[in-house]
Image: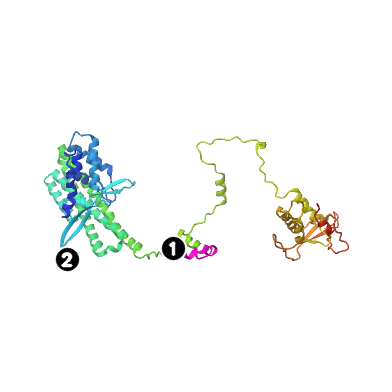
Amino acid sequence: MKALAVVRPLLALDESPAKRERGWEEYRLAELALAAIDFVTLRIGARTAVRQEAVVEQVAESAALQVPGRAGTEYREVARWLVERMINTERHDRCFRHEIGSVTSDGFVVREFPFQILKDVPDEAGQAALTVTDAAITVLVHAIDVDIASEQIAAEAKLAALLKRARIGEAWQAARTAHVQSIRYAKELLDRMEEMKRNVRAIDWEADLEGPLKEAQEHVEERSRAETQLKAQVAQLLAVTEEEDKRQRLESLDALIEDCLQRHLMLIDMLLRVVPEFRRQQDRQIFVPPVIHARVHLRSQLLEPALELSIDDSERPLEAFVRGVLGPVRPRVMYLPDYFEALTRMPEQAEVELVAVGAPEDWEDTSDPPRFDDAQHAWVDRLLSAVPGEGVRLSRLLERARQWGEGRGPGDDTDHLLAMETAHRFRHVPVAELARGEEAVVVVDDGTELDDTVFGGSDFLLLPATGEPVSDNVDATPDIQPPHSSEFAPLTTSDDLEPSA
């Protein structure tokens, strides 16, 4: 029933309405389908496929032999339609299905038998290609679920007998059958390795691999020895044959036997890789602990709890969630020479339009305006030069800086200028001015804290000071007198702190 089910899609091609509607009544589509299967089977390897367009061209040539005198476009149209029907592109899973009944311990059971004939796969370049299935090979060798090794032994024994009787045509057909059985043997072994990669637990070493591997090794040895003897017999026949037609057929048979030998070498390579592959898949699938994935319910475990928190409190759990989802991110570290080279690299452009550089006077003045104007600098200089002899606090000067002049007020930043100037005088004591005997203002931090709405820190004490001139040939430090010393000369009085109109 399986054999009949596989043949049914091929016979249905000649009964298709498309054959009558398109005027293809003279074509024998089932036989063209067998030619397509034969072409693909004899040209694939264990891991290779045949381009779909190559199959279409081969079927078109067979169609031209059946119905000569038609246009080449019609032959290719028939071939392309036929190949697509054999791939079964009308179904999304590309499978044919047939129900088959069998008698079991539970009684008569009907099961669905899915199968494919030509299977579309990507080739090494990623383009559409075709390979055969076990069902397609079954159509060629007229058997299903048989011992492949026994079939090939029988085919080669038949080939040897035909060669002894010099029946070259029938011998070539027997060699082709043995060739197809060799392909099927390699495909069965490859399918077992692919199944091992998917689930090594489904493979029983003793039942599925140990015995079949031993049988496969014996099969390869015996078949290689038998094919070597057959090749020698063909060479002997070539030496005594003078007819050109028989010589061509013998040369074709010799090439076919040589291809069988090459395929057995490929089988030997696969057999050597089965045991290491089985152990590697065990290490990968069984002895490696499974990955545990913690599932998070976004609404109940993240969104709703986060909505109950404030923005500041929800920031840390949300960052942790995003970090866990995205994974670690490698920081980008730029090496300084590479950074400089990237900045100075010229862009790669086919054509670069040169722009003339203007004269210096052509450039616009883009300098930023000063933050403080001259009037603010003059007022701050006056406040600092009017420090009384007993000194004045920075907080008092800030109040004066915010209350001066018509149209001026707290928003004109004069207090910022005063604060920066005071901080500068605190960091840089005017030693040079005092050494020359000039008058200067000294800023002292006596630990008093500044109580201000804008600035913080220390409430500096600003004191006037005068130094003694230092002789050029005497190394001495300026004499800075305390503010209450009799030798202290104040610069001005406290009344001068009042802003003028």
Left or right, 173 with reference to 428? left
Q: Which residue is mark 2?
A: 106
User: What stretch of residues is rendered in magenta?
Assistant: 298-317
Whether residue 30 is in magenta: the answer is no
Name the amino acid type tagged 2: Asp
Question: Is residue 72 something that shows in the picture?
Answer: yes
Q: Nearer the viewer, residue 43 or 347?
A: 347
Q: Secondary structure at mark 1?
A: helix
Q: Which residue is mark 1?
A: 299
Q: Overall secondary structure of the magenta stretch?
A: helix
Q: Secondary structure at mark 2?
A: loop
Q: Earlier in the sequence, mark 1 or mark 2?
A: 2
Q: Nearer the viewer, mark 1 or mark 2?
A: 1
Q: Nearer the viewer, residue 134 or 409?
A: 409
Q: Is residue 20 depicted above or below 398 in this figure?
A: above
* Location of residue 13 (image quadrant): top left
Residue 168: x and y in percent read 14, 43
